[in-house]
Amino acid sequence: MLVDFMKISTVDYPKKIAATCFFGGCNFSCPFCYNSDLVNFKGSFMDDSIFFEYLDKRKGIVDAVCITGGEPTLNEEYLTEFIKKIKNRSLLVKLDTNGSRPEVLQRLLDAGLLDYVAMDVKAPLEKYPQITGFSDVDKIRRSIEILKNSNIDYEFRTTVNKNLHTVEDILNIARLLKDSRLYVIKPYKYTPEVLDEKISGNKDLEMEYLQEIYNRAKQEGIDNIKIGGKV
């Protein structure tokens, strides 16, 4: 459910001016997560009428809404109704998800409620239990296939943390996603808000590490890979 929102973003939805909504609660426990306050959210949820009043005042300025978290798909009923209110205002919707609820993703797509999906692929599938605390990797695989077979814009992305990911780990993800539209690798950027600093570390990932991954992927003919900024 809605915790807060950013009024204007020029980076969350490609080539669009967006408002970004933050949903509380997550079923992953990635140590490098910088939205740690949303993972085990214990505060008060926002009355979403405040957000929709804002959208109505910015009609013609805001093109899209990005829904992120936390993990927005954990409350399917609320999320669905929330998106319907956005679509009723003729705005585009982008969903950020960890891919753990493929059945929800499929229903949202079938209902025509999504225009763009960014799915975080946190690790090679065999490392999911270790890195995320989530063990049902078949659901991750299903979400990947759902997006690959969809007709909407989408991207896969990985925040690369040298303490947790080897070069080969990221290359294995890139191989898994080779035939997708876009795979973005992004550097871990330390903030004091990360979920577990002892594991994730307190130093930014050097770009040379990403460049090595990128170069090796290109050598293998993986052409959909791109280096991005902070998630």
Image: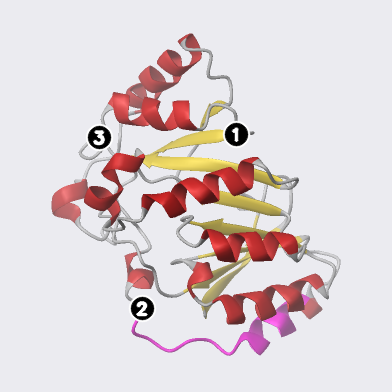
Q: Circles 3 and 1: CB distance less than 8 Å?
A: no
Residue type pointed to by label 1? Leu
User: Which mark lies nearer to you, 3 or 1?
Assistant: 1
**Nearest to the observer: residue 107 or residue 118:** 107
Residue occupying the far top of the picture: 219
Q: What residue is at 47 percent from the left and 46 percent from the top?
A: 141
Q: Is residue 185 above or below residue 107?
A: above
Residue at the front extreme, as displayed: 138
In the image, residue 106 lies at what x, y percent?
63, 59
Type of residue at label 3? Answer: Lys
Left or right relative to 151: residue 146:
left
Quadrant in the picture for residue 108: bottom right
Q: How many marks?
A: 3
The residue lying at 68 percent from left, 80 percent from top is: 81
> Which residue is located at x 45 percent, y 50 percent?
140
Number of the label disc, if any, that sits on residue 182? 1
- From the viewer's perspective, is 200 left or right of 124? left
Residue 48 counted in the magenta span: yes
The segment highlighted magenta reads 41-55
Quarter of the figure with residue 8: bottom right
Q: Secondary structure at mark 2?
A: loop
User: 10 Å neighbourhood of mark 3: few (<14), some, or many (≥20)?
Assistant: some
91 lies above or below 185: below
Residue 162's disc number:
3
Which mark sits nearer the N-terminus, 3 or 1? 3
Q: Which residue is mark 2?
A: 41
Q: Amino acid at mark 2?
A: Phe
Q: CA distance from mark 2 to mark 1?
A: 31 Å
